[in-house]
Amino acid sequence: MNFKKTFYLSVFTFLFFTISIYSQGFEGYYQYPDIHKKNVVFSAEGDLWTVPLSGGLAQRLTTHPEQERFPKFSPDGKTIAYTASYEGPNEIYTIPINGGLPTRWTYESDFSFMNCWTPDGKIVYATRAYATLPDYQLVTIDTKTKKKHRIPLSQASEASFDASGNTVYFVRPSYHGNVTK
């Protein structure tokens, strides 16, 4: 008799917490979050979403059938740069924080993934398109002039910059899952 009560109590507890968790809107998977002041951007269901840091209803920014990943807020918080494979290989795109049409920034024909922004507003991404070895290299794009600059660090795929933009912190060998935060 005691076992039966324990069993039913366990099942009830499991169902109660499962239903309450799903009713709160926590179901799903959420990847690659980035925070700027009071906003969060993340990937879920293959699209980009924003939500206030305090919580609330998330707003979908993209609806393309391909996956959008690695979103990062610009330093001013008005633009999100991300990786997507709209036209074949994964390339770098930007979209305004309120949604709209994406702008394509790279045409590498090799996997490019969004890394971060420099403090002065340049996009930083990693690609193997310019490497002579099968290693990633960091590249910046000036969003005003569209000029690219390769950061001369072999095997570097992840970076963070100090507030001045003069010092870069990176990991070698490439791609450890963004441990430069």
Image (cartoon, grey):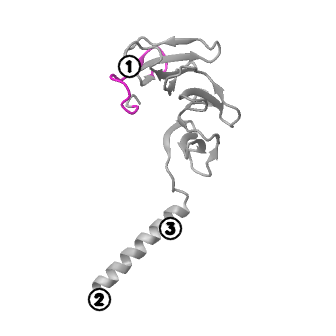
Image coordinates of residue 143 in percent, x first then y, are 62, 18
Q: Quadrant of the C terminus?
A: top left
Residue pictured at 62% horizontal, 51% vertical: 57
Vertical order, 144 against 175 (above or below) = above
Query: Is residue 78 shown to the viewer in this render?
Result: no
* Mark 2, residue position: 1
Q: Nearer the viewer, residue 105 or 117?
A: 105
Q: CA distance from mark 1 to mark 2?
A: 65 Å
SS at badge 1: loop
52 vs 98, left or right, is: left
Query: Is residue 152 shown to the viewer in this render?
Result: yes
Instruction: First in sequence, mark 2 or 3: give its number.
Output: 2
Vertical order, 61 against 20 (above or below) = above
Image coordinates of residue 43 in percent, x first then y, are 54, 41
Vertical order, 14 against 60 (above or below) = below
Q: Is residue 110 magenta?
A: no
* Mark 3, residue position: 19
The span picked out in magenta is 161-178
Amino acid bearing label 1: Pro
Q: Is residue 169 magenta?
A: yes
* Mark 1, residue position: 134
Amino acid bearing label 3: Ile
Asked if the residues shown at circle 1 and circle 2 are in contact, with their CB atoms under 8 angstroms apart, the answer is no
Image coordinates of residue 165 in percent, x first then y, are 49, 16
SS at badge 3: helix
Q: CA distance from mark 2 to mark 3?
A: 27 Å
